Amino acid sequence: MDAGLDVSRLRLLREVALRGSIAAAARELGLTPSAVSQQVAILEREAGTTLLDRSPRGVLLTGAGRALVRRAGAILELLEQARADLDRLSGELAGRVRIGTVASAAVALVSEAASRLAAEHTELELLVTVAEPARSIDALLNGDLDLAVVDLYDGVPVRVPDYLVATELCTEPLVVVSAPGALDGLGASARSAGSAGIRLATLADQHWVMPPLDAACGQAVRFACRAEGFEPTVRWETDDMLLLVRAVAAGHGITVLPRLAVADQVADVVLQPLAEPVMNRRLLALTRTSSQDRPIIRAVLTELGKAAG
């Protein structure tokens, strides 16, 4: 065994483990598969043992490989904590922050925060990816993101691992979105007593435009409808919020969305409060505990908080 193990090669082995193949790890890292294979072979010589079982169908970690990947994760986290300590002592607001965010928060919060940060801290670079919460959380845990803006809906639990830190940005209600005049015939009985909100159960006969089931909003609204005793008749299904609102405006159906997700500036739609049940969405910013105190992470969280109002 050589005197030491190269940290960059440990990181590379961890990528192979996370991605499931040398080719996938190479794509993620911007390398060729042959370069990755060569670096793993060097790491095996450093370790003095075989780390990957190679076959025509792919690669699997050996027992030694799995043990080393576990240690690599701990080593990389310690390095991140050391980086955070150095950044905190220097107060440096420079470098790259990779953000994953749900689409509506990207428009309503992240864009505004990014513009202010770009004006005030020219050495800070933000890279933004729009993704559903589960994907962003995985990427955050894997080290592919530094911060994730996720949403949590009533009735749809999302597991946030203990070693992630959540900063609450805002809580907002879900609203009923329809074309002008589309719900005029519902009558007073559709309204919740003592409020202007529309009772969800009275929308059972409507056609719906809805995010897909694998989107958190699509799950939450479907579950709420079923709890009220009906299955929504979905005529249009899309996770494109601009298309969704345009479809509603064209009269293809109604929808229920968080207020910040309603792109009412691009289409003529009517928004009304939802009642019985009242539904809410929380927007959270997640960071790893090992990086939460880095000045650039704190700066991004501060601006996100300001944008959330």
Image (spheres, rainbow, N blue to C red):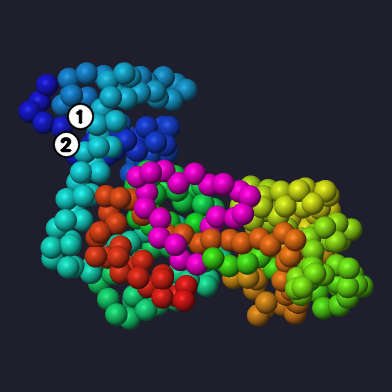
Expressed as whole percent of the image width and height from the top left, the position of residue 289 reads 30, 50
Disc 1 or 2, which lies upstream in sequence? Answer: 2
**Quadrant occupied by the N terminus:** top left
Camera-side residue of 50 and 255? 255
Which amino acid lies under the numbered mark 2 shown in the image of this protein? Asp
Which percent across, then down, holds residue 34? Answer: 32, 34
Residue 15 in magenta stretch: no
Pinpoint residue 54: horizontal percent, then vertical percent: 37, 21
Is 233 displayed left or right of 240 in the figure?
Answer: right
Q: Quadrant of residue 272?
A: bottom right
Relative to 83, is 263 on the left or the right?
right
Q: Residue at x 38, y 39 (%)?
A: 25
Which residue of the protein is positioned furthest toward the left in this rendering? 3
**Outermost residue, front direction?**
194
Mark 2 surroundings within 10 Å by alpha-carbon count, few (fewer than 14), some (14 through 19), many (20 or more): few
Residue for badge 1: 42
Q: Residue at x 70, y 55 (%)?
A: 221
* Residue 6: image tag: 2
- Which of the 4 quarters of the picture holds residue 266? bottom right
Residue 239, label in figure: none
Instruction: Tell me whether circle 1 and circle 2 mark residues in contact (CB < 8 Å).
Output: yes
Of the two numbered discs 1 and 2 in the rendering, the one whose residue sits closer to the viewer: 2
Residue stretch in magenta: 151-170
Nearest the viewer among 44 and 104 is: 104
Q: Relative to 6, does residue 283 appear above or below in the rendering?
A: below
Q: CA distance from mark 1 to mark 2?
A: 9 Å
Which of 52/305 is in front? 305
Count of numbered circles in the view: 2
Q: x%, y% of residue 172?
A: 58, 67
Kindly state the secondary structure of the residue where label 2 is placed.
loop
Work out whether residue 185 or residue 25 is closer to the camera in this orientation and state it. 185
Identified by mark 1, the residue type is Ile
